[in-house]
Image (cartoon, rainbow, N blue to C red):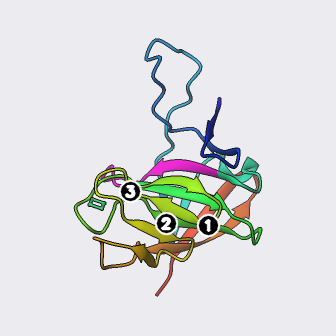
Amino acid sequence: MQLAAGSLGLAILAGCQNSDSSSASTPPVPTAIAVGDEWKITGAASLQPGQAMAFEWPDKTPGLIFIAGDAKLRAVSAKCSHAGCTVAWREKGEFHCPCHGSRFDTSGKVLLGPATESLPTYTARKHGNDVLLKANA
Ligand code: FES
């Protein structure tokens, strides 16, 4: 299932909260699986430019894999560095926090506070139907 998000027609795949909780077609949010020094997100390779896909770390921390305007496949922790709310993919190149309005760019850097720390970012690469993530230093 695909849900439209934002004014630019971007989409967020699997893992969006659907207001219709009775929907049986909403796929579950994939959980990152450790593979050596990388993390596998099953089925994420179908992501298209302009789309983001939610996933969870094993401790339930939210993450987002996305392809922004530069066509690079990347990922960020979606846990806001201010007070821990889940940030959303709103426009090409930005993540917005619904709690207090912080905004972050695709490299996780703060564009607007109150957050002062960047979102952790991950290098992402396709591996068959899956995506493998590696933490950036
Ligand atoms: Fe995100 Fe406060 S939790 S801005």
Type of amino acid at the residue the image marks with label 3: Cys
Does any portion of residue 88 appear in the rendered image? yes
Separation of marks 3 and 2 at Cα, in angstroms: 13 Å
Camera-nearest label, 1 or 2: 1
Residue 13 picture quarter: top right
On screen, 7 above or below 105? above
For mark 3, give the secondary structure: loop
Image mark for residue 7: none
Residue 91 in picture, x, y percent from top left: 61, 57
SS type, badge 2: strand
* Mark in front: 3 vs 2: 3
Query: How much space separates mark 1 and mark 2, taking CA atoms?
Result: 12 Å
Mark 3 sits on what residue? Answer: 97
Which residue, given by chain and number where applicable, does mark 1 sit on?
A: 93
Residue 125, image x, y percentages: 69, 68
At 59% from the left and 19% from the top, the residue drawn is 25
Q: Nearer the viewer, residue 136 or 37?
A: 136
Amino acid identity at mark 1: Gly
Magenta span: 52-61
Q: Residue at x 26, y 67 (%)?
A: 82
Q: Earlier in the sequence, mark 3 or mark 2?
A: 2
Kind of residue at badge 2:
Val
Q: Residue at x 50, y 33 (%)?
A: 28
Q: Which residue is mark 2?
A: 76
Secondary element type, mark 1: loop
Q: Is residue 37 visible?
A: no
Specify the farthest residue to the left. 83
Mark 1 → mark 3, Cα distance in angstroms: 14 Å
Q: Quick check: 87 left or right of 8?
A: left
* Residue situated in front as seen by the camera: 6 or 30: 6
